[in-house]
Image (cartoon, grey):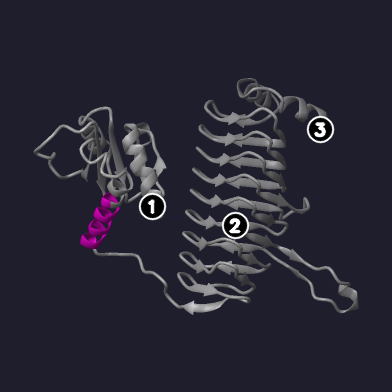
Amino acid sequence: MTLVYLLIGLLPSFLQRPIRNLMGGRVEAGARIAPFTWVAVRDLRMERGARIGPFVVLRAETAVLGRNAHVRPVSMFKVRHLEAGRDARIDPFVLVNCDYGPRSRLVLGKAVRVFSFSVLEPSEGIHVGDQTGLGGHTLIFCHGSWPNYLEGAPYARGPVRIGEEVWIPWRVMILPNVEIGSGAVIGAHSLVRSSVPARALYSGVPARQVVENVWTPLEDGAEKERRLAEVVESFHAFHEERLRGRVEIRSLTQGAAAAGTPEETVLWSFSEISGSELQQARKEGRRATVIDLANLRAFPGGPLGRDFVGHLATFGVRLSPTDPEEL
């Protein structure tokens, strides 16, 4: 089978998809596997928009890539079960390597990003919650030993669980049997060897608590709108005011601006957007981008709207591109 997978991996994506489906996979239309890959997976499932880039080596029993999940070029995987949720991204030069034991699993939630040069050893299971970022050079180990345990040397083995919206910047090492609560922040260059409470800031070698509650979700709608207005001004400043007259960014419930006819419109709401509201918003034109901040999703319109969605991501607001039929 090794030779078979090597030969399939030389083919263009439009040929790989039907062949892999005949071999028992479930690769949807719109998913792509680049040529010059070695994807040796018995049960491969890829939803529409999922991507595996060139020069990726993936060896697994089961691999599940959700909608728009991307494995970018020059990464290597050896794990029994790999799962990447919708909009997850694994950057180039990521190494995932462990034995094929019964608990060998790497599970990444929605919109998780693993930055370059990270090394993950998920022999006992690594679980990462939605909207969490693992910075470059992140090292996570589920097993640790080298000197002879029978002669009294230390030994560690156990899973690592990381909650939702956790921020792990560059060069952090996480040891076995660690659980990091949702919303926690870890300082760069830290060694995490014990569990971290939700929304706490831990830093150091070994990492210790610096701040008990580093941030709290806002309940004040006016403050949220003030912050969003700040993001809008930052967007225009970033583009040196060139886009201010070309794109109008306003609330879904706000009336259109009195002066000028912009090329595009971006309509946002902090409340869940219904199908009828989306349909009404679309009457603004085909280039209207609609942003549902309650569910962190965007209904793309024109290129300027996509630029604004990308700018939001630099503030930690990562939106999932969504088709209207998904409502």
Q: Secondary structure at mark 1?
A: loop
Q: Amino acid at mark 2?
A: His
Left or right placement of residue 222 versus residue 68 in this view: left
Which residue extends farthest left? 258
Residue receiving disc 1: 317
> Measured from the top left, where is residue 294 in percent x and y?
32, 51
Q: Residue sitting at 62 percent across and 44 percent down?
A: 92
Dot 2 crowding, Cα within 10 Å, few <14, some 14–19, many 20+ = some
Q: Earlier in the sequence, mark 3 or mark 1?
A: 3
- State if disc 3 and disc 2 touch (CB < 8 Å): no
Q: Earlier in the sequence, mark 2 or mark 3?
A: 3
Q: Quadrant of the C terminus?
A: top left
Q: Secondary structure at mark 3?
A: helix
Q: Which mark is residue 127?
A: 2
Dot 1 crowding, Cα within 10 Å, few <14, some 14–19, many 20+ = some
Q: Quadrant of the N terminus?
A: top right
- In this rendering, the label closer to the viewer, 1 or 2: 1
Q: Main secondary structure of the magenta part?
A: helix
Asked whether residue 1 is in view, the answer is no
Res. 137 image quadrant: bottom right
